[in-house]
């Protein structure tokens, strides 16, 4: 599956931009009476940034430097997403969301690297 997206980088970029747009849109919504912690929020943040990072790595991958760049770009997007929420009514900047996003990003990087190693050994 990874080879499919690496060979069709244009498709990986489309998916990256779609996920980034969805994250931005959902971050723009106001949730009055929204409580700080919920499992749905954790699940959303983790999965959204897992897939964002996964396809970003596929779009950029050409060696270790670009792998690291993809992870750093995903982390920067996670921080900018929280910064953006400072300007949305009833939303706030949340370190716990950034940590959840980061867990998804790092797991995506680990899964990607593991699958590359597995495919190289086959």
Image (spheres, rainbow, N blue to C red):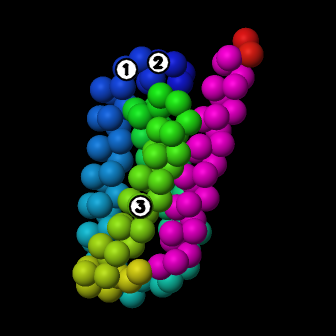
Residue 16 position in % (x across, y down) = 35, 42
The quarter of the picture where residue 99 lies is bottom right
Find residue 18 and report its image quarter: top left
Q: Earlier in the sequence, mark 2 or mark 3?
A: 2
First of labels 1, 3 by sequence position: 1
Per the model, the C-alpha gap separating discs 2 and 3 is: 27 Å
Question: Which residue lies at the image location 51% right of the left edge and 19% below the top edge?
Answer: 3
Q: Are marks 1 and 2 in contact (CB under 8 Å)?
A: yes
**Numbered disc 1: secondary structure:** loop
Quarter of the image with the C terminus is top right
* Residue numbers of the magenta segment: 94-120
Helix, strand or loop at mark 2 = helix
Q: Position of residue 103 (x, y in %)?
A: 61, 58
The answer to whether residue 61 is above or below residue 24 is above
The image shows residue 114, relative to residue 45, as above or below, that is above
Which residue position holds label 1? Answer: 8
Find the distance from the CA under tag 1 to the CA under tag 2: 6 Å
In the image, what residue occupies the spot 60% across and 35% down? 112
Q: Nearer the viewer, residue 22 or 81?
A: 81
Q: Is residue 15 magenta?
A: no
For numbered disc 3, what is the local secondary structure? helix
Question: Residue at the spot x=31%, y=82% of the render?
Answer: 86
- For the residues marked 1 and 3, what is the alpha-carbon distance in whole angstroms? 25 Å
Q: Nearer the viewer, mark 2 or mark 3?
A: 3
Which part of the image, by quadrant, shows the N terminus? top right
Q: Which mark is residue 76?
A: 3
Q: Nearer the viewer, residue 37 or 3?
A: 3
The disc label shown at residue 81, or none: none
């Amino acid at each position: 599956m990874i080879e499919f997206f690496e060979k069709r980088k244009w498709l990986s970029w489309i998916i990256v931009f779609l996920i980034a747009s969805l994250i931005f849109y959902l971050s723009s919504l106001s949730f009055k009476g929204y409580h700080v912690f919920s499992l749905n929020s954790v699940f959303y943040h983790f999965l959204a940034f897992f897939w964002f990072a996964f396809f970003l790595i596929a779009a950029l991958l050409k060696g270790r430097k670009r792998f690291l760049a993809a992870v750093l770009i995903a982390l920067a997007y996670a921080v900018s997403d929280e910064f953006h929420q400072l300007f949305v009514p009833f939303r706030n900047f949340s370190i716990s969301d950034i940590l959840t996003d980061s867990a998804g990003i790092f797991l995506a990087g680990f899964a990607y690297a593991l699958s590359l190693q597995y495919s190289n050994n086959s």
